[in-house]
Image (tube, helix red, strand yellow):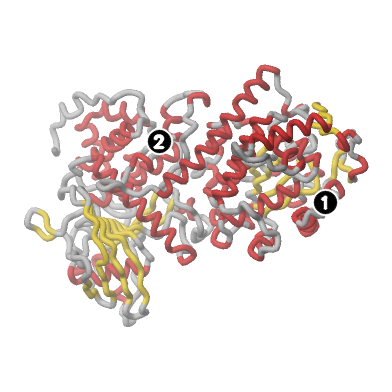
Amino acid sequence: MIVLREEDFHKLVEEFTRCLTPQGQVASAIEWKTAVKFLMARKFDVRRAVDLYRMHESIRTREGFHLINASDEDLRKELDTGKLTVLPSRDLNGAAIALFTARQHFPPLSTHQLVLKGLVYQLDAALESVETQRNGLVFIYDMTDSKYSNFDYELSIKILTMLKGGYPARLKKVLIVTAPLWFKAPFKILRLFVREKLRDRVFTVNKSQLPNHIPRDSIPEHLGGGLKINHKAWLQVCLLVAANQNPDMDSYFISRGLHGSLRQTSMSSVSSDTDNNVVFSDFESEGSRETVSEKHNHEEREKEMHDALFLNSDTEKEVAVEKEDSQHFNYKRSGLTEASRKRSSDSSPSDSYPGDVPPPPLPRKKRPPSGPNILEDSIHLPDSGGMTLEELINHIKTLRKSGLFQEYAKIKMEAPAGTFNTSKAKHNLAKNRYTDVLCFDHSRVILPTTDDDPSTDYINANFVDGYKQKNAYISTQGPLPKTSGDFWRMVWDQQTRVVVMTTKAVERGRMKCGQYWPNEEETDDQYSEFLVCNRAIEQYRDYTVTSLILHNTKTEESREVIHIQFTGWPDYGIPHSASAFLDFLFSVRKYQSECTKVMGSAWKGHPMGPPIVVHCSAGIGRTGTFITMDINLHRLHDEGVVDIHGTVCRIRSQRAFSIQMPDQYVFCHLAIIEYAQAEGLLLNEVDLAGFESDSDSEG
């Protein structure tokens, strides 16, 4: 324990203030209590306390809550939800306990700014207690009975990043209680902390394990403890703090006696040393005791950690707003980082990359998904299968091209797992571009009927799941002139905002797709009840982006739809360049993310947005290849593994015959390797000499 006399602390405050005053200006007085918070949080190391102060101010400015008005109506509503509260109890070491209840958070109703305001407003009040300043904070993230619709990935990162490296409370533990499977699998928030060597502070626990970290009488009743929560009483304390009424903080908090039992205290029970001295306990608890060597290393690393966290925050923001250059969208900035490196080597935490952040394609989540089991419903979920990049390379080298052809041939021999009765119905036969490319009944897109005619609900299109996203895509044929109206009816009904076209309208002198949109700027065409207007065309080397306005003449509503066409992919072939294809794929992701954000609360489904419509001519070859690559790049980013064989099999269970040619199957393998090399995910160049040597089949 360190005890500083008041005059000594005044010197520290003066130094703290001087460091925060621009050169040439007279030092302005910083409140005593502000200096206490930041100096205590960094063990009276003025330099590190100044860094923390600047960090905290930067976060508040960047997130737009530098000033918090306690009378703000939106803030009051946010506080009244009770999703975040500070408990009156403490842990055995005297740390305050903040509780965030995930099931009470609804992303469409609360902006990040508002949630962070509510958090800081309450933590500022909690830090008015000397005991909290001295002993730190335990943060409970309660996920009991929460749904995927309650979870906001980006917000969680912001909260945890701020608590560790940008707030003057000493974060002792983060306890994630009853985390559902969908939380553990897709988001892996703990990665951030593992990378920053904080694994000893973050715990995922169930209710029965919670007393191992917090005494039972300090745990709320709904989590199996004996504590009653009085959130209204706590908000009254916060209001008094905000009004500078100097409330008796220890009349709210319940401290622990010598034997560890809870007892109510008052300011008079605090050591008289605090009247003129500052008392600071330096991690004296059993749970955090370190050797001298460990303590030294920890203190040296702590600055590095919050610098890295700050860098993460800035980098993530930069990536999120990045636009494509004059030729291509930079797919390298939207690629994977930590997951694949972690899976591709057994490097220690010290070998990780502090500048890496969880990158796109995860967009800002402002709306809940539809249904409670949206992740579990997808057929593409993390499992025990898959290959690391090294395993994939060895697989390719072992099989070579001919072996991959044989692997694909076995897939192709599998009989379709479903019926095609609706596609074969007499009144629907003319709507199929090819007589042998039909729709599974179980996954077909069903259109709303017109004029009570049941035959009008058919279009040659199937829903296909994405990685941990049900119905992420619609695989469909290139529209016929007679089905263009049905196509736009499907786009409208599914709220699609991005249409991906991987064919040209005419190839090798044959019509591959009808001209279902106006192909000149400032022109429009009518398709049934839909007026489609070409607002702008952006031409890139390998693809064309057209901004369309889709106007429903029946409802007089209009929507913007992005049409993005890849032009470097011959029929029955593969893209002329893997890098060009990857530029195209990540441009599709970018537009999908941007369009979903624009939809805002109008979209009630999965946070990745409405289905992306993908088509070529038949809707199976190039379409299946695009979807296979997108799914595997998502999985590579999330888990560090790919499963091309399994992905193709699963896609074919929803859209029959997806991936039409063996070369397309081989392309998926080689494009993953090219992507990994471009991203620096492989330590050495990949030598595929001899890959083509014994290919004697279908090339």
Q: Secondary structure at mark 2?
A: loop
Q: Is residue 43 left or right of residue 491?
A: right
Per the rendering, the mark at residue 641 is 2
Name the residue type under label 2: Val
The N terminus: image quadrant:
top right
Point out the tag, 1 or 2, that comes first from the N-terminus.
1
Instruction: Give the number of the mark in front: 1 or 2.
Output: 1
Q: Which residue is mark 1?
A: 246
248 sits to left or right of 162: right
Residue 107 left/right relative to 603? right
User: x%, y% of residue 454?
Assistant: 32, 76
Can you give x and y, in whole percent of width and height, for residue 315 in the image?
Answer: 46, 41
Check disc 1 and give the amino acid type: Asn
84 or 445, nearer to the observer: 84
Q: Farthest residue toward the left?
A: 509
Rendering coords of residue 325 (x, y %):
30, 47
Quarter of the image for the C terminus: give it.
top left
Q: Quadrant of residue 407?
A: top left
Q: CA distance from mark 1 to mark 2?
A: 55 Å
The answer to whether 318 is drawn above or below residue 594 in the figure is above
